[in-house]
Image (cartoon, rainbow, N blue to C red):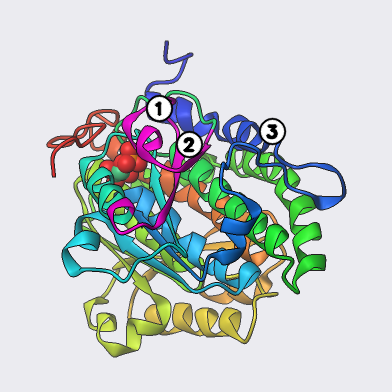
Amino acid sequence: EKGGYDWFMLKEIAEQPQAVADTLLGRLGENGELVLDEVRLSDQELRDIDKVFVVACGTAYHAGLIAKYAIEHWTRIPVEVELASEFRYRDPVLDRSTLVVVISQSGETMDTLMALRHARDQKARVLAICNANGSTIPRESDAVLYTHAGPEVAVASTKGFLTQVVACYLVGLFLAQVRGVKYADEVASIVDDLRELPAAVSQVLAGMEPVRELARSLATEDTLLFLGRHVGYPVALEGALKLKELAYIHAEGFAAGELKHGSIALIGPGTPVVVVVPSPRSRGSVHGKVVSNIQEVRARGARTIVVAEEGDDDVLPYADHLIRVPRTPTLLAPVVTTVPLQVLACEIADTRGLDVDQPRNLAKSVTVE
Ligand code: F6R
């Protein structure tokens, strides 16, 4: 049933191009138009939304952090992202014109379910992004957008995550479309870019042998740091979470710009630092700033593992290890940059002789608060 793979996780990582394609299937219409018939909120309800909350746990929360960048940019609606376990305990400001997007692969996570009930009690509209058909969370929501990842068996979410990110893009673009925002041209070209994602993920997967080798050389480390900026920041958090849960190695993700505000003190001789580099086409000078961060950590002894777009040669002088990903529009980059970090965590755990599919102390769906 593992289809020739040693672990379900490896099989599910390999299924990601198909999972992404299936999540897009039938939803990208002609002329950059999105077709999301399942979202049973009327155009008027969607136009009335003046605030979005994205609420989720763990890996799904990281998908939510990425959603914030995309939804705000495309729709100009303010978006807040919150951990489900915190959301209802701080009395968030919610009303009829608030859209609460809950993200859950399993659809059974108790923290997320309780947050959704709280949101509905406060009259907010709830849209679920979910993978498990007919599970509790979509049943209790006003609307649902299913990710079509297929069953995810490994405890660590991989194709679940990538398809959640894609579903968040669809929600953002759909809101932009219904509300007729000024980024209309950009939105149409992004729809074309979405169609390229499955092939881009396949391309990343085809180049993973050096990552496997690298993983073997990292298996005895006791700490790894992950840096990212803009949408690369949630990717760094996700890379660190995967490593913690699978390899039981201390790992932390940081916003690269925060390094100088404290965390850089952690870096000593040989500390492995994974850096997710934004596209050179990113807004502002974010790319150059992250390249400077790589230089800074290396000057303090770090062993740098750099995830950068093809053709980005600025990183070459500072990368001890270079992982290439295909050129992708800035906001869509997490769909490609996350993949090598999944493989890295999986292979490090395997090298350490651990059970990749069933890490200690964890369950696939967390049905207690
Ligand atoms: C980590 C992981 C968890 C889940 C989290 C939410 O790899 O899988 O962090 O993402 O428990 O689960 P769902 O998405 O089922 O609500």
Magenta segment, which residues? 120-147
Q: Earlier in the sequence, mark 3 or mark 2?
A: 3
Q: Is residue 143 left or right of residue 345?
A: right
Asked whether 32 or 316 is in front, the reply is 32
Position of residue 56 relative to residue 130, above or below, is below
Q: Is residue 126 magenta?
A: yes
Q: Residue at x 49, y 51 (%)?
A: 338
Q: Is residue 224 magenta?
A: no
Position of residue 9 relative to residue 116, above or below, is above
Q: Which residue is mark 3?
A: 25
Q: Determine whether the beta carbon of the residue marked 2 sits less than 8 angstroms from the nearest atom of ligand 1.
A: no
Q: Earlier in the sequence, mark 1 or mark 2?
A: 1
Outermost residue toward the top in this view: 1
Q: Secondary structure at mark 1?
A: loop
Give percent across and percent down for residue 244: 24, 50
Q: Is residue 219 visible?
A: no
Pointers 1 and 2 in contact (C-beta within 8 Å): yes
Q: Which mark is residue 152?
A: 1
Q: Residues within 10 Å of mark 2 (few under 14, many from 20)?
A: many
